[in-house]
Image (cartoon, rainbow, N blue to C red):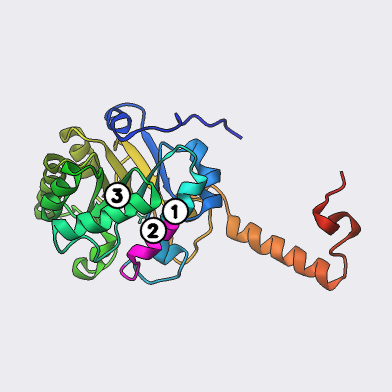
Amino acid sequence: MSSPVAIKGLTIPQLMARKGGVPIVSLTAYTMPMAQSLAPHLDFMLVGDSVGMVLYGMDSTLGVTLDMMINHGKAVMRGAGNTCVIVDMPFGSYEESPQIAFRNASRVMKETGCAGVKLEGGAVMAETIRFLSDRGIPVLAHIGLMPQSVNTAGGFRSHGRTEEEAHEIMDDAWAVTHAGAWAVVIEGTVEPLAKSVTESIPIPTIGIGASPACDGQILVSEDVLGLFNDFTPKFVKRYADLSDAASKAAGQYADEVRARKFPSDEHCFGVVKK
Ligand code: KIV
């Protein structure tokens, strides 16, 4: 097993200072035990609203509520040690006005103790990003493929293929930069565009299905660990097959119970004899 190389407890300014340097490593986490396993290896962790699809089996992230995000945020904070944790703002909790966004984002910050929030949207969210960051809430922006806009975008498809879309994404990147976002997630965007956004703007870009040239990368842990099989994007590399391991372990347990092999003497009372 490789030894952890993440510097513990990076602050937002320290993460910003990684622009153009050693790539920023991030994964999602939704639970305390997963946060504990991942934390030593990460520069920051995201409690993503992908939780709705990955843990709850929803078809999209639209049904995720603020209370769900706060509860998962609290759980992750209990396992994250001093690794920086960012919590996603769910659909409907921030789009209406900067004031409503502040009310909900400050609840997330207060109740979870996380370091900042993420929200989807470029130019259209610039005023809100400015409002939040001027009032002490660090914002990680999210542009390109925005899963909360799946209905208007016509599905989960890659973005930036036409000249018009490429201009729009570049404009979004600049809009969130000027609005005070500390970094921006670029999702599902064609490689040359993600690279050129990264080379243009002064804040870190965190790619997901975008470009290795981004200043950092993020993936959904369950995809990487083989724990979510409903839909795996093409760009995901699996580093383990934990669903298969869980199923095999459950099968072995079932066989032993049926054969009355379990609990054996050595497992009684929680004492394992060596
Ligand atoms: O919700 C999520 O998990 C995300 C990332 C994967 C960027 O937004």
Which residue is the site of mark 1? 74
> Image quadrant of residue 66?
bottom left
Which residues, given as a range, are shown in magenta?
Answer: 62-72
Q: Residue 14: x, y in percent?
A: 32, 29
Q: Quadrant of ligand 1?
A: bottom left
> Which residue does the numbered mark 3 point to in the structure image?
117
What amino acid is at disc 1? Lys
Q: Let me know if residue 68 is in the magenta part.
A: yes
The amino acid type, in three-letter code, at marker 2 is: Ile
Q: In the picture shown, does residue 248 fall above or below 136?
A: below
Q: Is residue 267 left or right of residue 116?
A: right
Which of discs 3 and 2 lies nearer the camera? The answer is 2
Residue for point 19% across, 55% down:
121
Marks 1 and 2, how far apart at CA: 6 Å
* Pointer 3 or 2: first along the chain: 2
Q: Nearer the viewer, residue 86 or 251?
A: 86
Give the number of the mark in front: 3 or 1: 1
Q: Quadrant of the C terminus?
A: top right
- Could you tell me how far apart the alpha carbons at marks 3 and 1 are, in whole angstroms? 13 Å
Residue 232, how many percent across, how many down?
A: 43, 59
Sequence-wise, the earlier of marks 3 and 1 is 1
Instruction: Tell whether 241 sits left or right of 83.
Output: right
What crowding class fits label 1: few (fewer than 14 Cα within 10 Å), some (14-19), or many (20 or more)? many
Q: Is residue 206 magenta?
A: no
Pick the front one: 44 or 130 = 130
